[in-house]
């Protein structure tokens, strides 16, 4: 791996900021692994031993990443489907990681944050709408005044594959979402949501089970009338919702 040309790197208080996605390494052990065509990005390495790995087939429409400390990891899959791709602000803190699967798309810029040894995984084929946030943390600490202990420590997030986050849906620390599910408009997910269901509300609760969704837009993709499943090509995510007393 070789360092990027100097004109593609700027510095802020001696911290390297990468402006074009390409192979990179520096004296602090920060690494970018990518062998696709150059893409305009903003990658800020503030610490050491951070790794950004991007699939060579990834479609990056916007990417801004802050590695705020040491030992962070960000992996991005192919993210290239239906001429759409990834638009995201991503923050990776100390000993933390974010992993984004293949064919994940965003309608507008999504905010993703994992800090303080927390981890986010987003499966394949996920569809993220507009004004969405996926955060393990609350950005600022909250303490119990009698004990002085933190009461809002970050918690891991696990989103399955083929999950649809509707506009303004937010996924917070401790959330898990099963494959094939839909998170409704403005919902806030903090707990466990099973597969193939619709969850809505604050906090999000399951409102419909045994559902499946597909990407073709109702108006933009022919046929313009889709009254049943015979009018779309079925994905591999048509399953019954698992039974559990937890939901």
Image: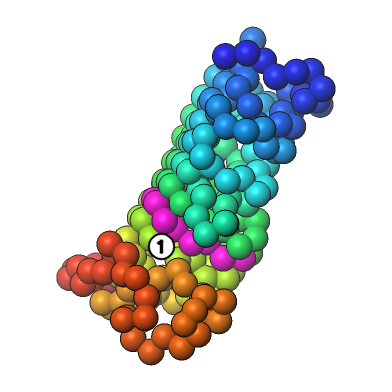
Near mark 1 (Cα within 10 A), the count class, few <14, some 14-19 or many ≥20, is many
The percent coordinates of residue 144 (x first, y second) are 53, 51
| Vertical position of residue 171 compared to residue 100: above or below | below
* Helix, strand or loop for disc 1: loop
Which residue is depicted at the point 48% across and 43% down? Answer: 78
The image quadrant of residue 132 is bottom right
Which residue is depicted at the point 77% across and 25% down? Answer: 8
Would residue 125 appear left or right of 166 to someone viewing this image?
left
Q: Is residue 123 magenta?
A: yes
The percent coordinates of residue 190 (x first, y second) are 43, 62
Observer able to see residue 187: no
- Which quadrant, please, contains the C terminus? bottom left
Which residue is depicted at the point 68% across and 26% down? Answer: 46
Q: Is residue 67 magenta?
A: no
The percent coordinates of residue 215 (x first, y second) are 45, 69
Instruction: Determine the main secondary structure of the stretch shown in magenta.
Output: loop
Which residue is depicted at the point 43% across and 47% down? Answer: 102
The image quadrant of residue 1 is top right
Q: Which residues are magenta?
A: 122-130
Residue under label 1, please give it.
163
């Amino acid at each position: 791996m070789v360092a990027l040309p100097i004109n593609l790197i700027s510095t802020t208080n001696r911290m390297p900021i990468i402006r074009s996605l390409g192979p990179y390494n520096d004296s602090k052990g920060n690494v970018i692994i990518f062998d696709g065509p150059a893409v305009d990005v903003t990658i800020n390495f503030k610490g050491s031993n951070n790794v950004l790995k991007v699939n060579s087939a990834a479609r990056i429409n916007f990417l801004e990443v802050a590695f705020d400390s040491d030992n962070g990891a960000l992996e991005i899959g192919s993210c290239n489907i239906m001429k759409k791709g990834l638009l995201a602000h991503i923050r990776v803190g100390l000993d933390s990681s974010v992993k984004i699967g293949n064919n994940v798309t965003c309608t507008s810029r999504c905010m993703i944050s994992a800090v303080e040894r927390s981890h986010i995984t987003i499966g394949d084929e996920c569809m993220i709408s507009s004004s969405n946030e996926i955060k393990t943390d609350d950005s600022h600490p909250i303490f119990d005044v009698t004990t002085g202990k933190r009461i809002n420590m970050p918690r891991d997030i696990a989103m399955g594959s083929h999950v649809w986050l509707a506009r303004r849906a937010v996924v917070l620390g401790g959330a898990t979402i099963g494959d094939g599910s839909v998170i409704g408009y403005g919902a806030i997910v903090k707990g466990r949501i099973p597969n193939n269901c619709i969850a809505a509300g604050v906090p999000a609760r399951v409102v419909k089970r045994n559902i499946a969704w597909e990407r073709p837009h109702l108006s933009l993709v022919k046929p313009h009338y889709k009254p049943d499943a015979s009018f779309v090509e079925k994905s591999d995510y048509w399953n019954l919702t698992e039974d559990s007393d937890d939901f």
